[in-house]
């Protein structure tokens, strides 16, 4: 006789199903520790690049001699909490840039990693609050990546701090990794929903119109591709299909996930070569690093070993770690031993452990819920409760993701600023040259960099009328500081050029948006 195996009871089947579900969720939110290390290094390098690029316009954007003095900041934005608003002097802002660069360098090498990450996030939020007029979607994503990074074990690999720990597991899966991966997917899902509200993304014309904005966006390869409308239409369909498929990033695992992540990365590298949008493409590329599974990092490690790159990297890493630990031992050594009761030491250790658990688990869990609600609110699905909105505002975590949505811009243009000098002559105060109403030769002649493009685009916006006075005042003072003959008054014109990619010529219209007396009131 065959003995019949006992059947599983309902409780056992439920437990087995829950175990399978838990395992599936854990696998989908697991991040390779080497990916987290590469993510940390990428964030640190991006911080250094961001500081370097912003330093070119430090006085113009972040001091009292610039386009947004602190008096205007407080008047327009109310109570702001920014270390960069403590002083309006260039030297003080420059010092904060140096401190931020120090934290960013510590992130790159993995030294006091959590402290460096927290310091970097605080200073980045402070910098963003100091001048909201120069920010774009990439800045929002950047500070959110740093926010989630504070709760992640970034120093387990390729870090000076890594010598203090020994991790057997290759991956880590917790609420912080869940939040990081969900953050990236939420950006694309919300942006896709915004895009589907318009017509151009659905009929294949959106990228055609984006690449027709010669002065604002196109650069390098973009100037060449602008003439190939059929190719740009195909790119429009490809991009909207990709962002609609973005939830698959959380469903797929292994090589299929890596392939989909690589498709996004390739698209953003394409943006880097064709559009003037600052560091945004590279920030998104860094955000995709945690999506690459262990099989990719195993392959990369094997390749590094075969090419002889692995051993020199380890050797230099060990030397740097040894030097830094020697410095740490001299700094941290107490002058004399302090007797402490064993019970007190144990209590302090327990409090520290519980505090660390609360910080790395409860806080990201709470903000993950709030960020999901904020993204749902952005597309009209729900409303964030007032206490939650206050928490989002305090952490600068509110999100909208309206990049080129629901429709891309359909108007290009540039500024002309005729200014009358004390001797009666006229100059262009924006470009410090003769006044010309002819189209500029290139976008670089109009907008020196992506920050100026974003700022001047916002000044033209209907909701920023005060900033037209602030810009005019800045142009007056900038000229008067460096020239013998002062400006008496100026007129701020925006030459509007509707985007007509299917026509050989595009009409223009001159719109005066501000008359300003340089000796008059600050706001006119």
Image: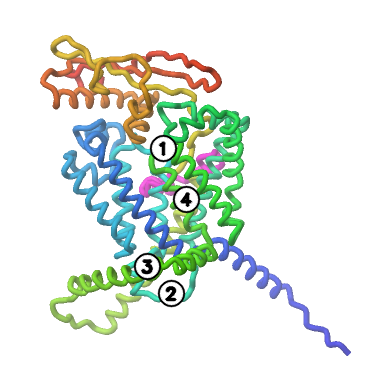
Q: Earlier in the sequence, mark 2 or mark 4?
A: 2
Q: Is residue 174 left or right of residue 474?
A: right
On the image, the x and y values in percent for residue 467 come to 30, 27
Front one among 282 and 523:
282
- The residue range painted magenta reads 376-398
Residue furthest bottom in the image: 1
Distance (Cα) linking label 2 and label 4? 31 Å
On the image, the x and y values in percent for residue 212 come to 49, 26
Label number found at residue 277: 1
**Residue at the image position 14 percent from the left and 26 percent from the top:** 482
Label number found at residue 356: 3
Front one among 176 and 508:
508
Q: How is the image coloured?
A: rainbow
Q: Earlier in the sequence, mark 1 or mark 4?
A: 1
Distance (Cα) linking label 3 and label 4? 21 Å
Q: Is residue 477 left or right of residue 401?
A: left
Q: Earlier in the sequence, mark 1 or mark 3?
A: 1
Label 2: state its secondary structure. loop
Distance (Cα) linking label 2 and label 3? 18 Å
On the image, the x and y values in percent for residue 241 come to 61, 41
Q: Quadrant of the N terminus?
A: bottom right
Q: Earlier in the sequence, mark 2 or mark 3?
A: 2
Label 4: state its secondary structure. helix
Label 1: state its secondary structure. loop
- Residue linked to disc 2: 167
When asked about the image quadrant of residue 348, the answer is bottom left
């Amino acid at each position: 006789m065959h003995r019949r195996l006992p059947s599983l009871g309902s409780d056992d089947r439920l437990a087995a199903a829950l175990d399978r579900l838990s395992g599936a969720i854990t696998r989908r939110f697991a991040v390779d520790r080497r990916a987290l290390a590469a993510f940390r290094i990428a964030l640190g390098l991006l911080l250094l690049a961001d500081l370097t690029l912003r330093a070119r316009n430090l006085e113009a954007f972040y001091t009292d001699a610039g386009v947004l003095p602190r008096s205007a900041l407080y008047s327009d934005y109310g109570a702001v909490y920014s270390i960069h608003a403590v002083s309006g002097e260039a030297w003080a802002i420059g010092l904060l840039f140096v401190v931020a660069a120090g934290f960013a360098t510590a992130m790159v090498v993995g030294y006091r990693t959590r402290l460096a990450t927290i310091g970097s996030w605080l200073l980045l939020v402070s910098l963003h609050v100091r001048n909201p007029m120069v920010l774009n979607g990439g800045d929002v994503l950047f500070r959110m990546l740093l926010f989630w990074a504070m709760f992640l074990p970034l120093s387990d690999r390729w870090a000076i701090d890594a010598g203090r720990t020994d991790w057997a597991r290759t991956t880590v899966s917790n609420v912080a990794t869940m939040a990081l991966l969900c953050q990236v997917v939420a950006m694309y899902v919300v942006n896709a929903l915004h895009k589907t509200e318009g017509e151009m993304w659905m009929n294949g014309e959106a990228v055609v119109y984006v690449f027709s904005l010669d002065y604002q966006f196109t650069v390098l390869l973009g100037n060449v591709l602008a003439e190939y409308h059929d190719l740009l239409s195909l790119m429009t369909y490809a991009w909207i299909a990709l962002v609609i498929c973005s939830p698959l990033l959380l469903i797929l695992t292994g090589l299929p996930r890596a392939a989909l992540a690589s498709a996004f990365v390739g698209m953003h590298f394409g943006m880097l070569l064709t559009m003037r949008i600052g560091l945004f493409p590279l920030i998104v590329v860094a955000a995709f690093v945690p999506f690459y599974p262990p099989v990719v990092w195993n392959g990369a490690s094997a390749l590094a070993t075969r090419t002889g790159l692995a051993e020199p990297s380890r050797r230099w890493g060990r030397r740097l770690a040894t030097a830094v630990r020697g410095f740490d031992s001299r700094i941290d050594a107490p002058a004399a031993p302090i007797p402490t009761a064993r019970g007190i030491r144990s209590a302090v250790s327990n409090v520290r452990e519980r505090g660390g658990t609360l910080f790395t688990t409860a806080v990201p869990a709470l903000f993950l819920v709030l960020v999901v609600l904020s993204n749902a609110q952005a597309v009209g699905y729900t409303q964030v409760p007032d206490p939650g909105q206050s928490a989002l505002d305090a952490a600068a975590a509110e999100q909208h993701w309206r990049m080129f949505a629901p429709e891309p811009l359909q108007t290009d243009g540039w500024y002309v600023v005729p200014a009358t000098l004390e001797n009666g002559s006229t100059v262009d105060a924006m470009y410090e040259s003769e006044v010309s109403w002819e189209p500029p030769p290139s976008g670089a002649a109009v907008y020196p960099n992506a920050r100026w493009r974003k700022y001047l685009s916002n000044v033209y916006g209907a909701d920023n009328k005060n900033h037209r006075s602030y810009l005019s005042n800045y142009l007056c003072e900038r000229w008067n500081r460096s020239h013998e003959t002062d400006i008496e008054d100026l007129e701020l014109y925006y030459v509007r050029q509707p985007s007509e990619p299917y026509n050989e010529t595009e009409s223009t219209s001159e719109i005066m948006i501000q008359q300003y007396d340089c000796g008059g009131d600050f706001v006119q």
